[in-house]
Image (spheres, rainbow, N blue to C red):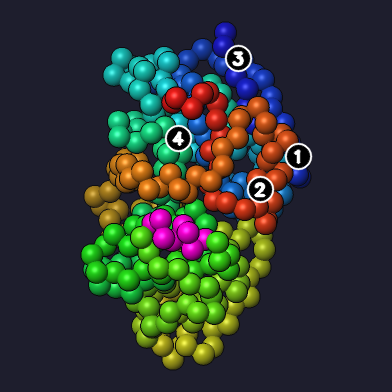
Amino acid sequence: MHEARSLWYAARGKVDLRRAPLPPRRDDAARIETLWTGLSRGTERLVFEGRVPASERERMRAPLQEGDFPFPVKYGYSAVGIVREGPVALLGRNVFALAPHQDLFDAPLSLLQPVPDDVPARRAVLAANMETALNAVWDGGVAPGDRVVVIGAGMVGALMAYLCARIPGTRTTLVDVVPERRAIADALGCGFSKPLDAPGDADVVFHASATAAGLSCALACAGDEARVVELSWYGERPVEIGLGAQFHAGRLTLVSSQVGRVPPMRRARWTTGRRLATALALLADPLLDALITEEVPFESLPETLPRLLAADAPGLATAIRYRGRDH
């Protein structure tokens, strides 16, 4: 019987690696040897700090999660690996799965998405974030020629700016309080601004900074009757915003965006599987390697995760390495 090692959030601010045998593989599942997983800083920081609200614990469950919030819980949803056992058509192929940080795991075939041949396994860990960004662009209704502002140059914000900047004629500006993130905007082909210099009169504004100040900035950037799309996940933390000034006079629309559902205008034709396959295909651009600013070995997570999930942690995406770089 195979044994697997997995990361568990054991208590507030504490994680450990645990070993457990894998049960016999089911016929409708594949056994995957993990190559890389991606760390979702915003969501996993809430899990690490035990701040998942009781009202959201069921909605927050990842597909292959074990345990229950707050602790102990095995959590994560961005894994890329090689199929070692399963259908002949998938054997030896790289696949993406919404799976926790674990070096060997079984997943139902319905949860697996083959990684395109032109997308390296390491870059494919961005698929969950790209899917969120794609869903948000749909929710925003961005069209050619629009003025677009993205508040918050984290992973999702950067990917939204990347997508919007490639819609013909758009003028896309990425806004962040960290001046060094101008380099990310330059690499992605969009403009950059600090909050106080952020452009106004935008047609669509995306907010992804998870701060009240960022949301206020988003509202201030919106032009008359513009759409402001809120992506931030605050957990149990209350958020105070000012809905005076431009909000009513400008007849602004504040829209929530959440990747759990395909937007209504596409739901009749798009499944979540089709959306994920599209997100993976969008990762073929080598420019996106700039968003992975650190990689760490799986074995080091008990020591490195507190630093990586700190509120002031530098960089963007962290790739967790399970095998050598040649994959």
Looking at the image, tell me whether mark 2 or mark 1 is earlier in sequence order. 1
Secondary structure under badge 4? helix
- In the image, what residue occupies the spot 55% across and 61% down? 180
Q: Which of marks 2 and 1 is in front?
A: 2
Looking at the image, tell me whether mark 2 or mark 3 is earlier in sequence order. 3
Which label number is shown at residue 14?
Answer: 1
Q: In the shown orientation, is residue 205 left or right of residue 142? A: right
Looking at the image, tell me whether mark 4 or mark 2 is earlier in sequence order. 4
Amino acid of disc 2: Leu
Q: Mark 4 points at which residue?
A: 122
User: Which stretch did the figure color magenta?
Assistant: 181-188
Circles 4 and 3: CB atoms closer than 8 Å: no
Q: Mark 3 points at which residue?
A: 3
Q: Name the residue under label 2.
A: 309
Q: Residues within 10 Å of mark 2 (few under 14, many from 20)?
A: many
Amino acid of disc 3: Glu
- In the image, what residue occupies the spot 23% across and 65% down? 168
- In the image, what residue occupies the spot 29% across and 19% down? 89
Amino acid of disc 4: Arg
Secondary structure under badge 2? loop
What kind of secondary structure does the magenta stretch mostly adopt? Answer: helix
Looking at the image, tell me whether mark 4 or mark 3 is earlier in sequence order. 3
Q: How far apart are marks 4 and 2 (CA)?
A: 20 Å
For residue 74, above or below residue 191 = above
- Where is residue 110 drawn, in percent x and y? 37, 31
Q: Which of marks 1 and 4 is in front?
A: 4
Q: Residues within 10 Å of mark 1 (few under 14, many from 20)?
A: some
Q: Distance between the residues labelled 2 and 1?
A: 11 Å
Is 49 or 272 nearer to us in this picture? 49
Residue 219 in view of the camera: no
